[in-house]
């Protein structure tokens, strides 16, 4: 089954052609970063207008690069949420219109399911329908979650962040350090010239109260807002902060990544897994990858990181998920497809 996927949940306008859930024939991603940079973050109105301008060209480009025409496409897939409502609407509206005009099925895909599927775009990954248990860290700009994946229908949420996502913590930290936007890559780059001081930002302590975690085990949940505040307080007290920016970047990055690594260790103490996986924009981070490789090595687990080009938002993961688990909407349901922010996992 050959699927054209559309992703417009945030500030990347993306389209891709993927066959049978795993063979990526094309993946086109138009980043809007330059448009949002002057504001230090994504401006929803700018994002949705940029999607409107770019999406027709991005879709055309995805078909051309795959060497395909509309007749070759069996179905459309689109991200319906979670994400920025006004951005999601652009992709969903385009996908509905194409499905109606072309008479092709439309498969709505949850953005987070898409990120999970990006791991299966790794050539060494098992089949997505396989039951091999995977402990997967999903770390993006909007979400941080520890998942136990045991096949497509059994994805359990072991833990999640109670406040900022890891990527958001990096973006806000980079802003405090005047390192620019997006913050994750900026902090990673700056950190290469610095030294991580473990005592500057101790990795956030594990939570203890279940009342705050909605019933999830506090040891596998995350909280980054205190870390961000401690960076702010330290910077305010340090007159020489600008000359130590690389050390601040390295120390802050280390605290974020050590927290993620710690919660993975906690997760491994609670569920069985054969594979350790990492997906989402922050999965691009080399320090995080090396910490995860270390944990996997110590425990004799296989490790799979999402391919770098499918870590940040892309449509290949959306078309891939739809191809692996096609659940098209009935034609009379098309009008009812809305932008619904939900993560379909069980706690
Ligand atoms: O998955 P993604 O594109 O968007 C969401 O679904 O949120 O992730 C974007 C996030 C941003 O917070 C960005 O700073 C972070 O991923 N990121 C990184 C790196 N590249 C992107 N964080 C750490 N290191 C990187 N190299
Ligand atoms: Zn994402």
Image (cartoon, rainbow, N blue to C red):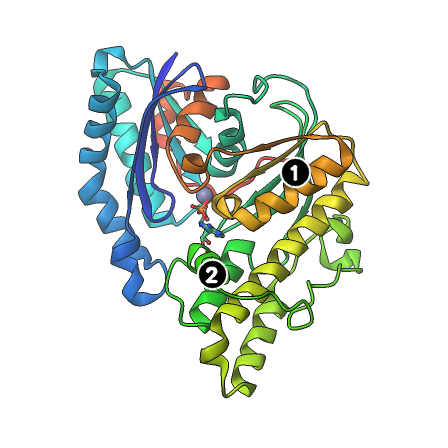
Name the image quarter holding residue 227. Answer: bottom right
Q: Position of residue 98 (x, y in %)?
A: 24, 25
Question: Which residue bears the numbered disc 1?
Answer: 147
Instruction: Specify whether 59 is left or right of 121.
Output: left
Q: Residue at x 51, y 38 (%)?
A: 112
Dot label at residue 49: none
Instruction: Specify whether 228 is left or right of 102.
Output: right
Q: Residue at x 45, y 30 (%)?
A: 109
Name the image quarter holding residue 186. Answer: bottom left
Dot label at residue 187: 2
Q: Is residue 57 above or below residue 163?
A: above
Q: Does the image show residue 177?
A: yes
Quarter of the N terminus within the rendering: top left
Q: Does the image show residue 326?
A: no
Q: Residue at x 50, y 36 (%)?
A: 115
Q: Residue at x 53, y 61 (%)?
A: 169
Mark toward the start of the polypeptide (2 vs 1): 1
Query: Pointers 2 and 1 in contact (CB under 8 A)?
Result: no
Label 1 residue SS:
strand
């Amino acid at each position: 089954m050959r699927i054209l996927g559309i992703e417009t949940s945030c500030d990347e306008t993306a389209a891709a052609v993927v066959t049978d859930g795993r063979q990526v024939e094309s993946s086109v991603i138009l980043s809007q970063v330059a448009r949002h940079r002057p504001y230090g973050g994504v401006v929803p109105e700018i994002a949705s207008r940029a999607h409107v301008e770019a999406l027709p060209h991005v879709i055309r480009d995805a078909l051309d690069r795959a060497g395909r025409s509309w007749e070759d496409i069996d179905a459309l897939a689109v991200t319906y949420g979670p994400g920025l409502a006004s951005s999601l609407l652009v992709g969903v509206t385009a996908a509905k219109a194409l499905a109606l005009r072309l008479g092709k099925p439309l498969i709505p895909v949850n953005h987070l399911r898409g990120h999970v599927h990006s791991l299966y775009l790794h050539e060494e990954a098992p089949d997505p329908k396989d039951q091999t248990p995977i402990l997967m860290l999903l770390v993006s700009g909007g979400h941080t979650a520890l998942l136990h994946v045991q096949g497509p229908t059994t994805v359990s949420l072991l833990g999640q962040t109670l406040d900022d996502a890891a990527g958001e913590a990096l973006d806000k930290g980079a802003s405090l350090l005047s390192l620019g936007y997006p913050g994750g890559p900026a902090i990673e780059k700056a950190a290469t010239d610095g030294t991580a001081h473990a005592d500057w930002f101790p990795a956030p302590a594990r939570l203890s109260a279940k009342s705050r975690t909605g019933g999830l085990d506090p040891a596998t949940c995350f909280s980054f807002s205190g870390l961000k505040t401690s960076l702010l307080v330290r910077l305010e007290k340090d007159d020489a902060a600008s000359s130590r920016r690389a050390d601040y970047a390295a120390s802050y990055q280390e605290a974020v990544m050590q927290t993620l690594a710690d919660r993975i260790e906690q997760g491994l103490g609670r569920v069985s897994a054969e594979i350790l996986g990492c997906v989402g924009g922050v999965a691009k981070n080399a320090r995080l990858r090396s910490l995860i490789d270390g944990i996997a090595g110590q425990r004799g687990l296989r490790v799979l990181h999402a391919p770098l080009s499918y870590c940040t938002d892309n449509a290949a993961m959306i078309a891939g998920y739809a191809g692996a688990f096609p659940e098209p909407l009935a034609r009379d349901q098309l009008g009812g497809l809305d932008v619904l922010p939900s993560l379909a996992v069980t706690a």
